[in-house]
Amino acid sequence: MRLTRDFFSRDALSVAPDLLGKTLVRKFETGEELRLTINETEAYRGEEDLGCHASKGRTPRTEVMYHQGGLVYVYLIYGMYWLLNFTSGAEGHPQAVLIRGSAEIEGPGRIGQALMLDKSFYGEDLISSERLWVEENTNITIKPEITTSPRVGIDYAGKYWAGRHWRFRG
DNA sequence: TCGACGATTGCC
DNA sequence: GCAATCGTCGAG
């Protein structure tokens, strides 16, 4: 069953750990489906979070994070990898959850490659999209053991924000 | 308009 | 250890 708007409308710190164990589905134009089990996420939350792109304010790039939850926020990193994020929270609250890894494919850059993401996915609605969405995983019967740790690659955000344990693995 | 840099990865 | 590679943003 596809995850609802309500699921993504909650705070990023609730959505990020709850996405662990969920199934990410990408349907290609060929009709072929790629299904990945999410096992690693990170929360980016608000303009005050110096590790969040929205800390620079509302710009063309960060715009979608200010919208409702359940939308796709993709951006090009190092000129070669598209990183996948889902917006969360309510309208006006810039938040996003980075999909950092899955059981089948590890690494945010590799996930983007496997899903063949590009700029056209910016703003895609996970609740109605025909090519990308998230489902409940019916195979999992027990809730995964979740561990937390500091987010990756944001030392520039300073000791406080880089030190928040907003990376979730399960 | 210009230059620095990044929520990464893979090869030397 | 470092190059690849380009959109974004702040400075000039």
Image: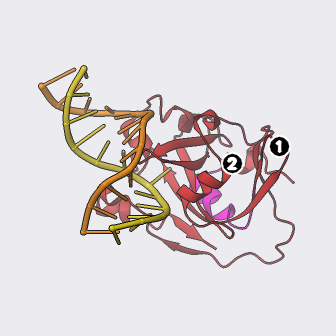
Chain colours: A red, B yellow, C orange
Question: Start and end of the magenta stretch?
Answer: A8-24
Q: Quadrant of the C terminus of chain A?
A: bottom right
Residue of label 2: A8
Q: Is residue A72 magenta?
A: no
Query: Taking A154 as reference, is A81 above or below it?
Result: above
Q: Secondary structure at mark 2?
A: helix
Q: Is residue B2 left or right of residue A18?
A: left
Q: Is residue A9 left or right of residue A93?
A: right
Q: Position of residue A34 (x, y in %)?
A: 77, 56
| Chain letter for mark 1 | A
**Quarter of the figure with residue A138:** bottom right
Residue of label 1: A30
Q: Residues within 10 Å of mark 2 (few under 14, many from 20)?
A: many
Q: Quadrant of the N terminus of chain A?
A: bottom right
Q: Position of residue A141 (x, y in %)?
A: 84, 76
Q: Secondary structure at mark 1?
A: loop
Q: Is residue A19 magenta?
A: yes
Q: Position of residue A121 (x, y in %)?
A: 64, 37
Q: Nearer the viewer, residue A148 or C2?
A: C2
Query: Taking A78 as reference, is A118 above or below it?
Result: above
Q: Are marks 2 and 1 in contact (CB under 8 Å)?
A: no
